[in-house]
Image (spheres, grey):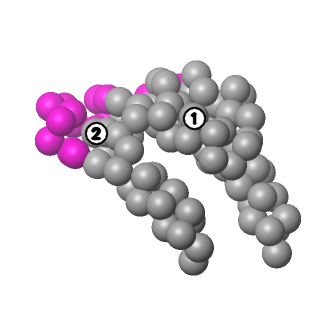
Amino acid sequence: MAEHEKWFAQAIRDLDDLVELGYLIRDELGLDVTAIIDDLRALTMHYATSRYPDAANAIPFEVYTKAYAERANRVIEWVRQNLQLRARSRC
């Protein structure tokens, strides 16, 4: 793994804000994240809660809705399409 890849992996682990992660992907990988930035903004609270479960102060089924699941699925699909394409182009 190249040095910049190690730095990027550590930066991802240290982030608590998905919008920051989106901007990091944009800046470091040159990918357009505008299609998912609103979803990242809405999901940040849930990302932090998944990393620190005591922060929710609620039962998960009371917090998570179908709308949040749909947002998460859009982000997952974007990642599959964009980051897999990037990985293939590096081979």
Q: Position of residue 28 (x, y in %)?
A: 63, 47
Say what amino acid the circle numbered 2 marks: Thr
Can residue 69 be seen here? The reply is no
Q: Position of residue 27 (x, y in %)?
A: 63, 40
Number of dots carrying numbers:
2
Disc 2 from disc 1: Cα separation: 21 Å
Which mark is nearer the camera, 2 or 1? 1
The residue most toward the front is 3
Q: Local crowd at mark 1 within 10 Å, few (<14), some, or many (≥20)?
A: some
| Image marks 2 and 1: residues in contact by CB distance under 8 Å | no
Residue visible at 50% across and 31% down in the picture: 19
Q: In the image, 85: left or right of 79?
A: right
Residue visible at 48% across and 34% down in the picture: 20
Q: Secondary structure at mark 1?
A: helix
Looking at the image, residue 89 lies above or below residue 1: above
Can residue 30 be seen here? The reply is yes
User: Which numbered tag is attached to residue 49?
Assistant: 2
Q: Nearer the viewer, residue 45 or 65?
A: 45
Magenta stretch, residue numbers: 52-67
Q: Nearer the viewer, residue 90 or 69?
A: 90
Say what amino acid the circle numbered 1 marks: Tyr
